[in-house]
Amino acid sequence: MLNTFLKGEKGTRLRFMGMLLSAILVLLSVFTLTQKGLNFGLDFTGGYLTEFTTSQSVELKELQSFIAKNHTGEFELTAQGNSHFQLREAPSASTTSITANSPDWQSAVTQNDDINAQVLSSAYIGSQVGDELFDQGCLAMFAAMIAVMLYLAVRFEWRLAVGSVVALVHDLILVLGLFSLLQIEFNLTVLASLLAIIGYSLNDSIIVGDRVRELLRVPSNNILSPAIIINNAIKSTLTRTLITSGTTLATVASVWLLAGAPLQGFAIALFTGIVVGTFSSICIAATLPELLGLSAKNYEVKVDVHTQTLLDMP
């Protein structure tokens, strides 16, 4: 049924409408990032982290209000389970919380009969370590992008390569925009998911790009317009793309729902990246080359030169 939407002018119109929607979402994501920024976790900002359990189930809001009465600095309390909690303090509060704030709220939750908490671990991450982690993470992402661009430059004609790179950047910006909009914590696991998104999005774009290139090289397709050829390429790969994306989304959704809070940010980023990556492989990676003038002539020259070389061989 989905293939019927990609026939003729209707399919081309839908691809261009999807590309316009992508451009609007990218602008909104950039605006959100500039206005709200990312909610960096302790992995990058540094701070004091304490994990503790309670003897019985306690509502997060009730526990948060109780701790606020015995804590003078800023903190963030998250539930890791029914009776497992994690308290994070900002770097500015961390230096004083070790000597003043932390004993106050820790003694309060451990001595309260209704809570009866037990501290499992306490750790301090310096801001210098966080800065190094952020720099190394960005360097890893930059290296991955450079490797991707070099690979595409060798594998594809430049118009298809540009479409794949733009689709890749589009996916990353939308994921970052979602994290900025919802102020979901951005930590090392989320950064790792962005590297995974780069690989997944590239794979999806290459599948479509390879099929477009194959159809452009068929001599009988010279009479067809590039739009029809691209639509045919998308139709021939759509089932495979949806099955691959669907099975991967099911796995990521299981991690999101069952793995708990520590991997929630990772799962959200990967789930979003797969969805927008599948969308961009059709509406950007396959559509942008058409706008840049991709046609069968771009491959006729290469075939003719190769043929001539073979004919000139003794």
Image (cartoon, rainbow, N blue to C red):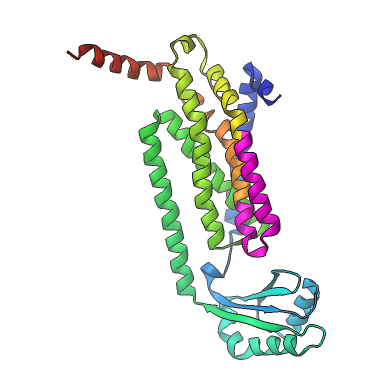
Who's the residue at 20% across and 12% down the image?
312
Residue 100 lies, in percent from the top left, at 63, 90
Please indicate whether residue 186 sits to the left or right of residue 138 in the image.
Answer: right
Q: Quadrant of the N terminus?
A: top right
Q: Quadrant of residue 55?
A: bottom right
Who's the residue at 38% across and 45% down the image?
147
Q: In the rendered view, would you say 110 is above or below 146?
A: below
Span highlighted in magenta in the image: 242-269
Q: Quadrant of the C terminus?
A: top left
Residue 28 lies, in percent from the top left, at 62, 46
Residue 293 in sight from this viewpoint? no
Q: Main secondary structure of the magenta part?
A: helix
Q: In the rendered view, would you say 66 is above or below 172?
A: below
Who's the residue at 63% across and 47% down the image?
272
Q: In the rendered view, would you say 49 is above or below 189?
A: below
259 falls in the magenta region: yes
Residue 239 in sight from this viewpoint? yes
Q: Quadrant of residue 302?
A: top left
Q: Is 72 or 188 nearer to us in this picture?
A: 188
Please indicate whether residue 146 sits to the left or right of residue 58 in the image.
Answer: left
Who's the residue at 55% across and 84% down the image?
95
Q: Is 160 or 270 nearer to us in this picture?
A: 270
Residue found at the far right of this picture: 114
Q: In the rendered view, would you say 128 is above or below 300?
A: below
Residue 61 lies, in percent from the top left, at 79, 72
289 falls in the magenta region: no
Residue 20 lies, in percent from the top left, at 61, 33
Q: Is 208 or 181 nearer to us in this picture?
A: 208
